[in-house]
Amino acid sequence: MTSAEMKAAILHHLVYTQGKDAVTAKTYDWRMALSYAVRDKIVDRWFEATRRAYAEKRKRVYYLSLEFLIGRLLKDAIINMRLEESVLDALKDLGIEWEEIIEDEPDAALGNGGLGRLAACFMESQATLGLPAMGYGIRYENGLFRQRFEDGRQVEEPEDWLNQAHAWEFARPEVSIDIGFGGHVQEIGSRANWYPSEVLIARAHDTPVIGWKGRWGNTLRLWEARPMHGFDLARFNRGDHTAAAEPEAMARTLSRVLYPDDHTEQGKELRLKQEFFHTAASIRDILRRFESEYDDLRLLPKKAAIQINDTHPAIAGPELVRILHDERGIDFEEAVGIARNTISYTNHTLLPEALETWGEARMGRLLPRHMQLIDRIDDLHRRETGTHDLNAHHDGKVHMGTLGFIMAHKVNGVAALHTELMKSTVFKDLHELHPEKIVNETNGVTPRRWLLSCNPRLSSLITDSIGDNWVDHAEDLKKLEPFTEDAGWIEKFTAAKHANKVDLSNWIAETLEISVDPDSIFDIQVKRIHEYKRQHMNLLETIAYWLEIRDNPNAGWTPRVKIFGGKAFPNYIYAKEMVHLANDMAKVMNSDPLTSRFLKVVFPPNYNVSLAERLIPAADLSEQISTAGKEASGTGNMKFSLNGALTIGTLDGANVEIRELVGAENFFLFGMTAEEVMTHRAEAGHAARAIAADPRLARALETIRSGGFSPEEPGRYHMITDNLTHHDYFMVCSDFTDYWRAQRDVDAAFADKAEWARVAALNTARTGWFSSDRTIRGYMRDVWDVEAAPLVDLA
Ligand code: 26V
């Protein structure tokens, strides 16, 4: 597409789609016009891919996820369609700022964190690989809350991304599916009829997902909840205005909010309703498509693979069995077999408080037939394995992890260590019965968004050096290794990183009014705020460093900027205190004349996908410091490494694999192993002993306790200090001393600029394996048994 054609397309959409005159058009109008112009190009490729999937009778993959953290889509689309040149030229011609347009797009935050972002990366990789696939999710009216700080405290505001037209979606009112809840069951022999007492409509909204070079496109289908009967005119005419709108409001609540993953949220009826709504609509849609192409349901596992992203859609098993058995008349055991061979389940956490269970009373009330079928599935599983316990339904609850496991042919972990821990802890007994079921598929990230798009300087250097094949064959980044021995090339690499740091420094100055020195170590920890992720250990180390500088301000300190980002679950008080402490520390430290040359603390609010794209390319040091055994994988860790940051981290999640790939000598390792954590935790008084043995730690804790960062309220952080002193389940104190040691190793290493840059470049060269293309190929081979379509380049 030429620049002139692009310009004409933008102007066309501005006038005829957006209904605006170029004279009065605002940034929003131009962004919509540009988005429609780009979307037009995508649609052709998308249709072609969809038609081919049907014509070639290909097996499809269905990715069921309650979360898709897609972020902004415009730049992604332009890059994948290779339209940047024509778009940049056209915008220049029209006198429109590219940055301004890009920044105007709302960040679609239909997810909490890693699990949702992984789903988004998978969608992009599936499209890039030419794998016929469809993502199914919920079209939350309000995504994840927007975070603000008020006097350092987190305040949540609703995120209303759908307040303005969403350029990328197509509403499909013709795809409307009835979803029932409650009511009663009438059994007829083995089968039953279910008469729900409440029915809602699931309406589809489709967003095309285009792969690299536009060679393939798939669909992300998001469900909106609508009332069965809309507005009650009779009631309205009787003057009962509010009541007339009630059914509509009730139904809409279902797709209104994304549940915050607070790891303690339990038994929330609305959440269970959302899960069933999402799953039932998706399963219906999958079967409708299948039955339009084939007439034998026994072929389902050959033509469809259903992946459930954590247990949130795990009701898919019983629901599929219900349709096959009750509605289509297939024998119960055969129905279970078909469902199992179609479904597979990904586990994303072993934290006990995050493993879903539903009370039998609630489940029986809301899904009476499913409750019966779960008991029959348990019964069948007992007969198959000769066991008498290990039921999904026990102790008055339905355990969704067990149900997911029993109803899947494959269950996967998301990093090597995590998968081994699944086998030895949470799923130990089930694993012994089904030793072939658990497989590992280490997570990945799409290099299109997480290198090419977010880091144009480094990307250009890479492409100038080895060509652009790396973009969809990221293992090609290995070819950079010889360049890391070339001093001239390392200088260019350093220049790219430095320019990224200058950009970030300017942004920090403009938005937060904090001045930072781009020559400092940019030390970044961005992720959800959680005790197991141990932002407070990072804070303690920051305090200890600050105190040490104050003791001796003229020693040769290595300047650091400590950057934090992340949201605390609204009712996770401890995590909110961690946020508050970080902000209180920033206030004190950034204005300390003795130390502020050497140490700054920066905590931009509202960490999201777009902010990650801004921060990660500017990082020197990536903080991946979770208590070993607790972080299933991590995916931020991969993004940092790919963008040439060094990692300070524990042997947890995918850190283990990152360290193996980049080389142990290029990784700042510290802390206990998962095994050591388990034994150490059993030793009473571990926290007190650790504090007694490390004066730096003791002093840092004492500084918080005595109000060093909250003089107006010295006791403000007693929750944190008391917990760390007496309990410390996550081993902050016991790992602190080694963490401090590793941080000082970082200082020493950073002193040798050229050597640091060489290692940073090695990180980029050696982490191509973490492309989500590789992950998806793994699922295709080990889990889905599916092949991609051969791809043709854009004309
Ligand atoms: C639990 C709940 C409980 C009910 C309310 C809503 C909700 C939402 C999510 C969850 C489980 C979250 C599990 C999760 O996000 N795991 C993360 O998955 C990433 C991708 O595999 C992985 O990199 C992270 O290490 C892991 O914490």
Image (spheres, rainbow, N blue to C red):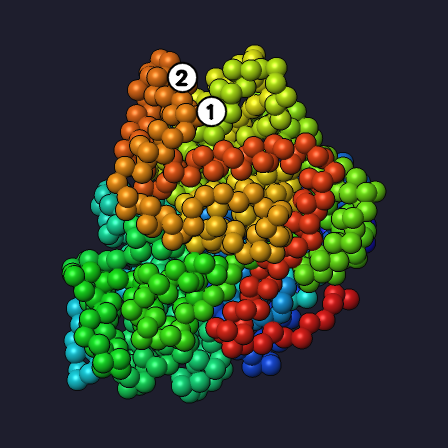
Marks 1/2 in contact by CB < 8 Å: the verdict is yes
Residue 95: percent from left, percent from top: 76, 36
Residue 288: percent from left, percent from top: 43, 75
Residue furthest to the front in view is 693
Residue located at (61% from left, 32% from top): 747
Which one is in front, 50 or 738? 738
Disc assigned to residue 543: 1
Task: Kindly identify the amino acid type of the residue bearing the numbered disc 1.
Answer: Ile
Q: Residues within 10 Å of mark 2 (few under 14, many from 20)?
A: some
Q: Does the image show residue 726? A: yes
Q: On the rendered image, what quadrant is the C terminus found in?
A: bottom right
195 lies left or right of 296: left
Q: Is residue 234 above or below residue 713?
A: below
Residue located at (40% from left, 84% from top): 297
Q: Is residue 48 above or below residue 463?
A: below
Q: Residues within 10 Å of mark 1 (few under 14, many from 20)?
A: many
Which one is in front, 210 or 759? 759
